[in-house]
Amino acid sequence: MSKLFELYVYSLRETYGTTILYQLSDEGKRQTHGKYGDVDFLKTDEKLIIDTKYKPKYNEEYKIEDIRQLSGYASDKGVLKKLGINDDERVVDCVIIYPDNNSNTNFDGRNLKETEIKQFTKFYKCGIKLPITRLG
């Protein structure tokens, strides 16, 4: 389900176009952005690192392992280079996108840095509603 949710969130590209990179280089070849691992998404114009988590409870809490994972991406020189950041002192914005059926269905006009995770500098979360299909 986690991979399926990640692919669903890929609809970011419909809203933000080529400013969203998804585990791919600009040439369309799969690559690891940095030494730490594969970043789900980068939003290059806003210098955002975006990770998807198929964890509906993000509405109420966060998981420290996820914060650590994004912190690793945010200090990875390969990821920072992909965002055009050369300043080792800069703290990069990180966003966790999670399923939230009380949220909007798409990203149109939304601030991805919707809700601050107050315990951490420049960490945010953004809920997205999952599609509902009716059988029969």
Image (cartoon, rainbow, N blue to C red):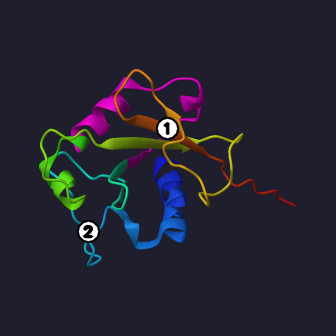
Residue to which mark 1 is pinned = 125
Q: Residues within 10 Å of mark 2 (few under 14, many from 20)?
A: few
Q: Is residue 118 left or right of residue 81?
A: right
Disc 2 versus disc 1: distance between alpha carbons? 26 Å
Task: Give the percent coordinates (x, y) of residue 33.
Answer: 21, 58
Residue to which mark 2 is pinned = 30
Please tell me the numbered disc located at residue 38: none
Decide: is 42 above or below 95: below
Q: Of residues 79 and 86, which is closer to you in this image?
A: 86
Residue extending farthest top:
119
Task: Give the percent coordinates (x, y) of residue 75.
Answer: 18, 41
Q: Is residue 122 left or right of residue 86?
A: right
Residue extending farthest right:
136
- CB under 8 Å between discs 2 and 1: no
Report the magenta residues as a range. Answer: 50-73
Task: Give the percent coordinates (x, y) of residue 53.
Answer: 47, 41
Task: Give the percent coordinates (x, y) of residue 47.
Answer: 32, 53
Split into 4 quadrants, where in the image is the C terminus? bottom right
The residue positioned 20% from the left and 60% from the top of the image is 84
Q: Secondary structure at mark 2?
A: loop
Q: Residues within 10 Å of mark 1 (few under 14, many from 20)?
A: many
Which of label 2 and label 1 is nearer to you?
Answer: 1
Please state the total of marks drawn on the protein image.
2
31 falls in the magenta region = no
Which quarter of the picture shows residue 24? Answer: bottom left
The residue positioned 39% from the left and 67% from the top of the image is 19
Q: Secondary structure at mark 1?
A: strand
Q: Of residues 38 and 102, which is closer to you in this image?
A: 102
Q: Amino acid at mark 2?
A: Arg
Q: Amino acid at mark 1?
A: Lys
54 falls in the magenta region = yes
